[in-house]
Amino acid sequence: MPPFVSPEKVSSSGELCMKLDELADDVCQQAPAGLFTVAGKVSQAAAQSAGQLQQLAHLHKVLVEEMKYIERPFEWAYEGLGPLLLRDVLETRRGISLSLTILFSCIARRLGISLTPVPVSQIDVGAGHSIATPELSKWLLRHDGMAGGGGQTSQETGVVSRVPPSSAWYWDPVKGTICDPSEVLLEFPHLGDHTGKGAILRIWTEMLRVAIVAHQRRGDSDAIAHCLHQLLALDLTDPGWDAMLKVQPVRT
């Protein structure tokens, strides 16, 4: 078995990319022959929906079950912003839903699987943002549809799936489950559309909301204000606008 990525501090974007490359190589080398191929090309297995399910099952097995990249309880006040930062997640193998889905997406794309991190629930950091501590948003990975061909059962692939092979679907990499958009929408009514031109803006706004929560827990008022102003600039419908417009101007 090839060695796992050593938990060393990643100090630059170049070193971060190297660590991600090494991690993707580890996943690939432990896979059955032909399951993955060079990044950017489609393997024979990926040409069928059953092969794609097997790829996801292998990613879950190596990254979650063996390497233990999972969510664990933590406190922002003691951990700093580490659980939000990819370089720290690589070192500690602990992150939040957002950072873990980004990590899984980076590895998957290096193995030729296009998965996009999307927020399926929303944080409300509107009125009272300086003292409130809302729950973190839930993130999944979206794939815009499996290739043609018949599916396989979860016993054959190791992935729990209730999705027709040709539809778009969402994958929870930590749990190893796959759901179609209608199922996700029932549980997360803020799902929205992640395929239009504004999709990337919604992802950025949710990332800023997570950053605000982290700074709230650490009491970083300047950082909270900085992130909140960016959030309001990106999302004109954010509830924070109501609170900002109600603030009375200071008379001098």
Image: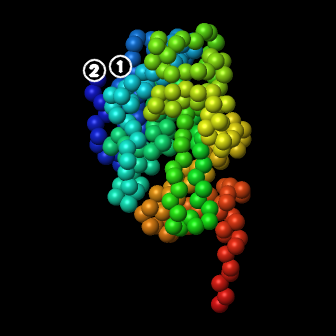
> At which x and y percent is residue 94?
37, 43
> At which x and y percent is residue 132?
53, 63
- In this rendered view, identify the residue nearer to me: 247 or 117: 247
Decide which of tag 2 and tag 1 comes sooner along the chain: 2
The residue tagged with tag 1: helix, strand or loop?
loop
The residue tagged with tag 2: helix, strand or loop?
loop
Name the quadrant of the C terminus: bottom right
Q: Which residue is mark 1?
A: 30
* Badge 1 amino acid: Gln
Q: Is residue 194 left or right of residue 139?
A: right
User: What residue do we see at 66% from left, 68% from top?
Assistant: 243
Q: Is residue 187 left or right of residue 84?
A: right
Asked if disc 2 and disc 1 are in contact, CB closer than 8 Å, the reply is yes
Q: Residues within 10 Å of mark 1 (few under 14, many from 20)?
A: few
User: What residue do we see at 39% from left, 24% from top?
Assistant: 61
Q: 179 above or below 211?
A: above
- Residue 175 in view in this figure: yes
Report the disc number at residue 1.
2
User: What residue do we see at 65% from left, 47% from top?
Assistant: 201
> At which x and y percent is residue 138?
54, 43
